[in-house]
């Protein structure tokens, strides 16, 4: 049953169809066979009865009761024997059942005549029975024989006679075997046809569904969400499916649109005041550059604003990421360019602690160091790099290094970020990608705790594998990002 | 230098105007798309700083309209949206550069300087010996043979061409081409120079890019 369930709706429908057809056909054939058998035996009995009558008309009896067959060759009288005479047996008895004479083929044997039949025969005139040659102890062309016990009486006879004829059933048996053979060959052929027809019909019935699937497959990505599936004219299940699907698309589209609108509104509403604050502060700081006390206060405020800006950007990015893979436009991105841009941005931060950012481009095959294109969203990859490298710089002790390595290989690009900081304890390793999770209080090392969870989400969307390995307490951390190879278009 | 700032947020407009004025630019301001378009139609500007979200229209439409009306100066777009798609849309509509809010004022000034430098730089073609570079179409050929370069390779070669015959230190190259101060253990510049050589030197009889041991690289004629 499980294997049938796995087999797919088309073959299941075809099997079901063939199954129903097989049951129907079998019942029909059985009924046909039964009916055939009945009419066949009736026709056979009628013929046998006529034969008996014919024979009886050719019998004559003299007044002492001796019998004469008037015409030895009944066939000559215009009658054709319907049976194979060689295998037929004839016996004539008197009305009390005593054998008067019988055919030579019977030798010393007699055709059976029991008490019950003898009692009934003078009323019923003809009684049909099935006997076997084994019962009789003689040979014939068929093992099954049809025995007719006939009550013959003529007005000029002294007494009635009992005429017994047994003929082999080889012809009807043959006919039945032929019919069964016909069924045995015909039914499987019919079933094969039925299964094929079922397969074809299920394909035909499912073709609108298949067409709809193809249609739906084209609708991917945000830009396509406005397209709808064609609704067929006929009011049926397919139309229902199409309408349901379109309703779903509508809701999805609305969700995306409102998500996008939210991000855009929130961006504007949150970022505009921050822009003004930051701008005004910067102007003030320039103006009062030579008043140390005021400047110190302004710098502190500016730092807090920067933190707020970072948090807002992280939250908005997270909102964008939540919208999922479909909202991202995948393009070819040269990874080394992105990495260098991030390094350029983070240099200032690194310089403050005198941390050297060392960058190595490597390749498994010499000369392919710059084959570092991946498929993705540059903005997001940039943000992912920034998060990891910024983290490394933040956790690196003063006057140390952060090593960046980009290695191109046929199995994809690998980016490694290594710092020589405090490292990550084993129990924290599993949690670093959780939101707002931090290894160190934010007054020691600033940050919102969103960075790595965003980076992890971006990595997931780009099928990038993150491998985070602490080199041991106080020996630093290595983060390895493995990009999947770009698929040839 | 005349700069027009189109920004509906009064306070943002205020500090941008103040900051730009302090930096020595002549600043006009408009608080709506229509006011901005009227101002730009009536007087000449070298640069327009344009906010994307305006009360009476979209900054991208304004940029498009400005270009249609034959505005030849630079357009720098400011926006709170920072996805790549938004940036591409902004640049496609006719903007020359794109800065997302919130920004540091120094960055705004640096971008404006860079844009105006583009105008002063003036040269659209660079060449050395049989090597030619078209800065507009971003094409390079040597001995009449086209050479395909990536964006970064192009920038690196451009820097070499602008400073032909002068030995350049790694620090100079890093800061000018990548904006990064590479330390001695980084091999980014060497990898790029190696790739550039493979493309512009190896297929040709004479070499142009030479290593200056312990110093850096130089673009010059082979026997000098």
Image: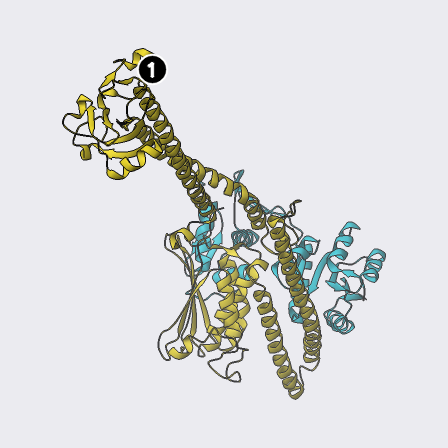
Chain colours: A yellow, B cyan
Helix or strand or loop: what does disc 1 sit on? loop
Quadrant hosting residue A112: top left
Q: Is residue B135 visible?
A: no
Instruction: Depth check: give the residue in front, A374 or A196.
Output: A196
- Name the spot of residue A269 as percent of width and height, x first: 70, 72
| Mark 1 residue crowding within 10 angstroms, few (<14) / some (14–19) / many (20+) | few
- Kindly identify which residue carries mark 1: A79
Chain letter belonging to callout 1: A
Where A130 sits versus B165, above or below?
above
B127 vs A39, left or right, is right
- Name the spot of residue B73 as percent of width and height, x first: 74, 55
Where A255 sits versus B136, above or below?
below
Identify the residue shown where x is 75% and y is 56%: B61
Identify the residue shown where x is 39% and y is 79%: A427
Instruction: Depth check: give the residue in front, A93 or A376.
Output: A93
Instruction: Depth check: give the residue in front, B116 or B211.
Output: B116
Where A208 sits versus A430, above or below?
above
- Name the spot of residue B204 as percent of width and height, x first: 45, 41
- Residue farthest along the front direction in this orientation: A63
């Amino acid at each position: 049953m499980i294997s049938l369930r796995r087999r797919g709706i088309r073959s299941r429908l075809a099997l079901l169809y063939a199954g129903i057809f097989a049951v129907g056909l079998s019942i029909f054939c059985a009924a046909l066979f039964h009916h055939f058998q009945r009419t066949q035996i009736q026709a056979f009995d009628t013929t046998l009865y006529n034969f008996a009558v014919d024979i009886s008309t050719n019998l004559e009896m003299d007044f002492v009761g001796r019998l004469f067959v008037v015409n030895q060759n009944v066939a000559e009288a215009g009658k054709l024997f319907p049976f194979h005479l060689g295998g037929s047996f004839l016996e004539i008895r008197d009305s009390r059942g005593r054998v008067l004479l019988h055919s030579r083929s019977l030798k010393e044997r007699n055709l059976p005549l029991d008490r019950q039949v003898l009692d009934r025969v003078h009323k019923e005139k003809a009684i049909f029975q099935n006997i076997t040659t084994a019962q009789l102890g003689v040979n014939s062309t068929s093992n099954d024989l049809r025995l007719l016990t006939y009550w013959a009486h003529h007005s000029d006879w002294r007494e009635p006679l009992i005429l017994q004829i047994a003929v082999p059933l080889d012809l009807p048996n043959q006919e039945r075997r032929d019919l069964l053979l016909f069924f045995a060959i015909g039914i499987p052929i019919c079933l094969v046809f039925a299964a094929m027809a079922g397969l074809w019909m299920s394909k035909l019935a499912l073709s609108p569904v298949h067409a709809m699937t193809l249609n739906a497959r084209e609708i991917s990505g945000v830009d396509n969400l406005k397209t709808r599936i064609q609704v067929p004219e006929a009011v049926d299940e397919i139309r229902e499916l199409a309408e349901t699907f379109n309703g779903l698309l509508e809701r999805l589209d609305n969700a995306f649109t409102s998500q996008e609108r939210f991000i855009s509104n929130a961006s504007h509403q949150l970022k505009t005041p921050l822009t003004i604050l930051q701008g005004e502060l910067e102007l003030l700081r320039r103006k009062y550059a030579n008043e140390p006390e005021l400047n110190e206060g302004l710098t502190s405020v500016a730092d807090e604003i920067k933190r707020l800006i970072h948090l807002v950007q992280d939250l908005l990015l997270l909102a964008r990421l939540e919208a999922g893979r479909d909202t991202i436009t995948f393009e070819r991105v040269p990874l080394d360019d992105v990495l260098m841009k991030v390094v350029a941005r983070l240099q200032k931060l690194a310089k403050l602690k005198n941390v050297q950012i060392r960058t190595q481009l490597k390749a498994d095959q010499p000369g392919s160091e710059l084959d570092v294109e991946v498929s993705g969203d540059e903005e997001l990859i940039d943000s992912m790099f920034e998060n990891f490298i910024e983290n490394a710089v933040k956790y690196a002790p003063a006057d140390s290094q952060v090593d960046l390595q980009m290695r191109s290989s046929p199995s994809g690009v690998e980016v490694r970020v290594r710092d020589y900081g405090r490292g990550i304890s084993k129990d924290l390793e599993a949690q670093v990608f959780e939101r707002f999770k931090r290894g160190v209080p934010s007054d020691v090392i600033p940050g919102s705790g969103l960075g790595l969870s965003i980076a992890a989400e971006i990595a997931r969307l780009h099928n990038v594998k993150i491998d985070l390995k602490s080199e041991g307490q106080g020996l630093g951390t290595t983060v390895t990002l493995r990009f999947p190879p770009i698929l040839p278009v | 230098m005349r700069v027009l700032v189109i920004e509906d947020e009064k306070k943002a407009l205020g500090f941008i105007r103040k900051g730009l004025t302090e930096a020595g630019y002549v600043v006009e301001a408009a608080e709506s798309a229509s006011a901005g378009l009227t101002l730009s139609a009536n007087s000449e500007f070298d640069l327009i700083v344009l906010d994307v979200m305006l009360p009476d229209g979209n900054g991208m439409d304004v940029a498009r309209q400005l270009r249609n009306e034959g505005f030849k100066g630079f357009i720098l777009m400011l926006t709170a949206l920072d996805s790549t798609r938004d940036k591409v849309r902004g640049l496609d509509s006719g903007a020359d550069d794109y800065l997302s809010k919130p920004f540091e004022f120094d960055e705004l000034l640096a971008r404006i300087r860079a844009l105006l430098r583009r105008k002063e730089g003036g040269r659209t073609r660079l060449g050395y010996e049989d090597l030619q570079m078209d800065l507009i179409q971003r094409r390079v050929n040597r001995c009449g043979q086209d050479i395909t370069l990536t964006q970064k390779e192009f920038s690196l070669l451009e820097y070499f061409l602008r400073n032909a015959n002068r030995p350049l230190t790694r620090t100079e190259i890093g800061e000018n081409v990548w904006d990064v101060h590479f330390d001695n253990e980084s091999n980014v510049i060497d990898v790029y120079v190696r790739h550039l050589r493979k493309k512009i030197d190896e297929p040709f009889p004479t070499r142009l890019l030479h290593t200056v041991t312990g110093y850096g690289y130089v673009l010059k004629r082979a026997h000098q």
